[in-house]
Image (spheres, helix red, strand yellow):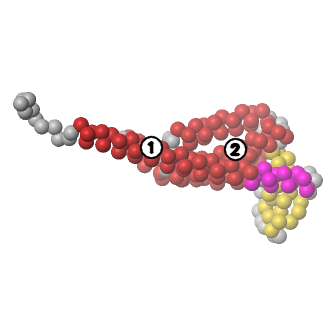
Amino acid sequence: MPPRPLIRPLLKKTDYDTISARIVFWQILFLFILEVTLLLYAVLTAVLVLLDQITKYFTRANLELGQSTPFLPGFLDFTYAQNTGAAFSILQEHTWILIISSLLVIAVLFYVMIRGYIRHNLGRLACAITLAGGLGNLIDRVVFGYVTDMIRTLFVDFPVFNVADCCVTIGGVLLVVYLIFYSPQDTKKEDGK
């Protein structure tokens, strides 16, 4: 008869195998959910870029430069404008600087999304919307050398803008809200691993 161990193991070898299989299962499930979530944000980004490009196409196809057409009387109209600069027409005629800076911001947002640095859905949503706006305007700058703007507010004097500009603004505001209220929670989760 073999000698009896002084300390009896709490789990048998088969129990360790079962626990390992369960851990691997939950890790795979987590990665699958993460992939599906990222896919949903990628679809949202693609839909917003498509919406931006469609509105720009119809503006270029149906309006002459500077021409306006009513959309919501007393509130909004469509006015075809070309912007070779950034917001409020800053950096006019410096499209190459805007292309490079847009590429850098898009690369950072894409990297942050893919690597999972932002875990909270608000932060991911903010990145996806901002990414859509950056991509929408980047496409125009690369293809045409200017950004097509068409939305003009009638109730307040404001520069003409487009769907991509709305995405950048909304995404930026959501990102600030995320950084102020939710980013510290993500950091605590990361530290508590």
Residue at the image point whose x is 30% and y is 39% from the top: 17
Mark drawn on residue 121: none
Q: Which residue is mark 2?
A: 134
166 to the left or right of 149? left
Q: Dot 1: what SS?
A: helix
Which residue lies most toward the bottom here?
73
Residue 154, by quadrant, is bottom right
Nearest to the observer: residue 6 or residue 119: 6
Residue 59 is covered by the magenta coloring:
yes
**Residue 20 location, x and y as percent?**
33, 40
Locate the N terminus and report the quarter of the image it occupies. Answer: top left
Residue 184 seen in the figure: no
Which residue lies most toward the front here?
1
Q: Dot 2: what SS?
A: helix
**Residue 78 location, x and y as percent?**
84, 60
147 to the left or right of 102? right
**Residue 2 location, x and y as percent?**
8, 29
Which residue lies most toward the right here?
64
Residue at the image point whose x is 74% and y is 51% from the top: 50
Mark drawn on residue 28: 1
Callout 2 touching callout 1 (CB < 8 Å): no
* Magenta part of the chain: 51-63
Residue 166, by quadrant, is bottom right
How packed mark 2 is, by other alpha carbons closer than 10 Å (few <14, some 14-19, many 20 or more), is many
Q: Amino acid at mark 2?
A: Gly
152 to the left or right of 68? left
Q: Amino acid at mark 1?
A: Ile
Residue at the image point whose x is 35% and y is 45% from the top: 22
